[in-house]
Image: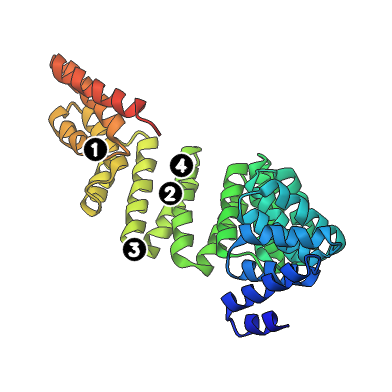
Amino acid sequence: ILGNVYFGLERYPEAEVRFRRAIEKYPNFRRAWENLGILYFTLNRPAEAVPCFSKVLTLGGWEAHVLGLLANCLASSGNPTAAELAYSQAAIIEPDNTDWMEGLLHVLLETRQFARAETVLRHLIRLQPRESRHWEMLSHVLIAQERNRDAIVPLEMAASLGVLSTEGRQQLGDLYVDAGFATEAMQTYRQLAAQDAVTGTDRLLRYARVLTSTGAFTDARALLDQLEGQLTTNSQRILHLQAVADWYAARGESPAARRELEALLVLDPLNPRALIQLAEIQIAAEEDALAALHLESAARIPESAFQANIHLARLHVKGRQYAEALARLDAALAIENAPA
């Protein structure tokens, strides 16, 4: 009782002394072992709490909260296998306790047991149908199992309940794109734009590029024209210019694509993708000197260095500058062979 008083007053060292003294005098005093474990758990000392809760179990204290606390401490101290067993046993005693189910879910995700995690999530959804994160996590677990079309369903359910988050709606739109559901993707991205203008516009711009890549040029151009008046940030203007450049390039209209890329580089002079694309257009137009300038810039940017060095090597070979070409190829190989 004195230990509990000190614990309530947050005088933890004194509480620990009293709990330990009680255990020394009465080694089978189950409540003292449990309180000492709770003290260590409160102080974020899970490894020390584990033997306390284990002792409670050996003394017959097979209660859900003891198993759940033991599982929390096992998971925190790096023993996910034992934590999984303890959470499962706690859930058997209290099957509707979401704390134990969520603890078990965390361990299953950590150990990449996605099929079992799916089962736990479906149970959590039955218990808490308006908890958006469960629906969205279920979608991610299905994606991890390469079941992307199935992953659409929980997000649609969350949307129908009115609990789908902005991130979830973004994920739903992306899944629609991957599945080829153009109408649904467009509708979802527009709903996203109504919730979050910046994020929604970004996704619509990316979707316009998807339409271009699939040859839906009319739809892509219509969407790009609609979005032109909705751009509020430099990053959106850059994305829009890139999407329009891609549209022209896909149709073989190099001069127009070049115009868009040059405007993009005014806003973002070190944009790696634009530097490479513009250089490729200039090489095709026999403007090797201008292309080399852009490739030199791209070669200093990690994202585009490999591709830029390959292009520069080709230009040097074309100009019979073989030593310079070899140096560029060596640089490209060094990037390709660098550890990830």
Mark 1 residue crowding within 10 angstroms, few (<14) / some (14–19) / many (20+): many
Vertical relation: 69 (above or below) 300: below
Query: Residue beneath label 3, please?
Result: 233
Circles 2 and 1, Cβ within 8 Å, touching? The answer is no
Q: Which quadrant holds residue 327?
A: top left
Per the model, the C-alpha gap separating discs 4 and 3 is 23 Å
The residue lying at 48 percent from left, 55 percent from top is 203
Mark 2 or 1, nearer chain start: 2
Is residue 102 visible in the rendered image? The answer is: no
Per the model, the C-alpha gap separating discs 2 and 4 is 8 Å
Query: Residue beneath label 2, please?
Result: 221
Find residue 212 and name its label.
4
Element on which disc 2 rests: helix
Q: Please indicate whether residue 307 sits to the left or right of residue 145 in the image.
A: left
Q: Nearer the viewer, residue 31 or 76?
A: 31
Mark 4 residue crowding within 10 angstroms, few (<14) / some (14–19) / many (20+): many
Query: Residue beneath label 1, please?
Result: 298
Q: Which of marks 2 and 4 is in front?
A: 4
Which quadrant holds the C terminus? top left
Mark 1 or 3, nearer chain start: 3
Mark 2 or 3, nearer chain start: 2
Q: Which of 31 and 246 is in front in this view?
A: 31
Mark 1 or 4, nearer chain start: 4
Q: Which amino acid does label 4 sit on?
A: Thr
Element on which disc 4 rests: helix
Q: Which of marks 2 and 1 is in front?
A: 1
Q: Nearer the viewer, mark 1 or mark 3?
A: 1
Circles 1 and 4, Cβ within 8 Å, touching? The answer is no
Per the model, the C-alpha gap separating discs 1 and 4 is 25 Å
Q: Which of 322 and 315 is in front in this view?
A: 322
Q: Nearer the viewer, mark 4 or mark 3?
A: 3
Mark 2 or 4, nearer chain start: 4
